[in-house]
Image (cartoon, helix red, strand yellow):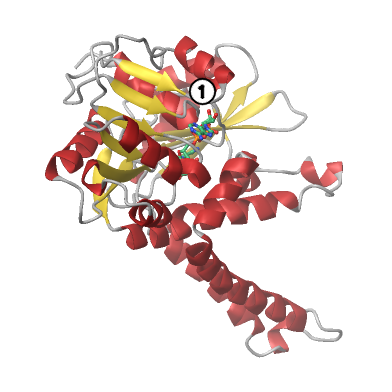
Amino acid sequence: MSLDAPAPVATRGPVRVVGTGLLGASVGLALSTRGVDVVLSDPSRTALALARDVGAGRLPADDDAPVTLVVVAAPPDVTADVVAAELRAHPHAIVTDLASVKGYVLADLRAAGADLTRYVGSHPMAGRERSGPAAALPDLFVGRPWVVIDSGESSAAALLAVRALATDLGAVPRAMDPAEHDDAVAVVSHLPQVAASLVAARLRDAPNAALDLSGQGLRDVTRIAASDAGLWTSILAANAASVGAVLVELRADLDRVIDALASAAAPGAAPETVPGALGVLARSIAQGNAGVARIPGKHGGTPRVYAVVTVLVPDVPGELARLLTDVGAAGVNLEDLQLEHSSGRPVGMAAISVLPGRAEHLERELTARGWRLAS
Ligand SMILES: NC(=O)C1=CN([C@@H]2O[C@H](COP(=O)(O)OP(=O)(O)OC[C@H]3O[C@@H](n4cnc5c(N)ncnc54)[C@H](O)[C@@H]3O)[C@@H](O)[C@H]2O)C=CC1
Ligand SMILES: O=C(O)C(=O)Cc1ccc(O)cc1
């Protein structure tokens, strides 16, 4: 199928998007691209106008037809109130929200006596470390899980409409109950955010000479430390119990490592004579190996281990394109590509992931074409 002719969608407009930041504008953009009429709303006039300007939809008009679906993409701390207001203002529309935490939204709506038959909470497991409509992407959701919460009171039509929205945007709907969802994201999303932020915060006072040595490991672990502080404060507070429980376990792990390091480093102690200390360190790394092996591929499915061929790429326009052409000419499928700049040198490193059986062949072919490989 051609990329500029998206598949027909089941979602019928007008769809109202409330909160036109990163997520709302991405939903609007993806739906508008597929020909769905999207009406935008945001208390920030700048966010609203910018969302319209990036193609996420249009401003409301007096003679608009009644909306069929409302997508609330506001910060988590205001989501329940906004959903309740939208259910009241659009008595025939189905309402979903995209907040990163689900239990408290449903609890607040239930306590407020909202019409839960027309409400289905949801959560696309897709995002970026940037906020606002300028960062919106129409293909943000493609191949990503999109959790759909059945409150037990949602109508079949409402569940179907929200599943259809996820599918229309290329995501994969996953049914979950709110508590299961909140515990799951505490481990796979909220813990990584806290860990990345705390690790990156250690860099504030590091000497420049140390930062000059930074490599891909540090970048991998800290990418999401650039996330928006306001949004994440709201997410963590909304999932405080589940995140707190995971952090208590992490604290116990950290204490074990700290104690092992202290005894290994005690004055006069040769590490090999300190019973248990090295075992604790090795076990911590090995348990990390076991955990990372369980992370599915980016677009789901079973984890896949690739071989990595690292190539030195001169920092000259066109060289990366020439490398990719040579990979194609070698008949090898590129599974992933990561670029790293070598600080202070006019050369970059391209880490090309390929199926393990193809690495040796690719190395031979690239060497024959004059490329230098990093060992
Ligand atoms: N950023 C991410 O990667 C992901 C975020 N989410 C969830 O999506 C929701 C939106 O997040 P982002 O788009 O990243 O945030 P954002 O900060 O980019 O956008 C939020 C928008 O909501 C608007 N807003 C504030 N108060 C409002 C109110 N009372 N009514 C309507 N709109 C209001 C803001 O003006 C802003 O334009 C949040 O609930 C978040 O938990 C879900 C998945 C991923
Ligand atoms: O940037 C990433 O890797 C993310 O995982 C983004 C993200 C942030 C918040 C969510 O609720 C869901 C996804």
Question: Please, what is the three-letter code of the amino acid marked with disc 1?
Answer: Pro
Q: Looking at the picture, how far across and down is residue 206, in whole percent?
A: 83, 49
Residue nearest the viewer, comparing 71 with 337: 71
143 lies above or below 101: above
SS for tag 1? helix
Residue nearest the viewer, comparing 174 with 287: 174
Whether residue 329 can be seen here: no
* Quadrant of the image containing the C terminus: top right
Location of residue 292 (image quadrant) = bottom left
| Residue occupying the point 65% across, 47% down | 218
Q: Looking at the picture, how far across and down is residue 344, in whole percent?
A: 78, 29
Q: Looking at the picture, how far across and down is residue 321, in whole percent?
A: 49, 16
Side (left or right) of 267 relative to 356: right
Q: Looking at the picture, how far across and down is residue 372, in whole percent?
A: 57, 29
| Residue occupying the point 62% across, 42% down | 230
| Residue occupying the point 55% across, 67% down | 244
| Residue occupying the point 49% across, 29% down | 22
178 lies above or below 246: above
Q: Residues within 10 Å of mark 1 (few under 14, many from 20)?
A: many
Location of residue 247 (image quadrant) = bottom right
Q: Which residue is mark 1?
A: 133
User: For the residue with label 1, is its CB less than 8 Å from the closest atom of ligand 1?
Assistant: yes
291 lies above or below 14: below
Side (left or right) of 121 relative to 190: left
Location of residue 26 (image quadrant) = top left
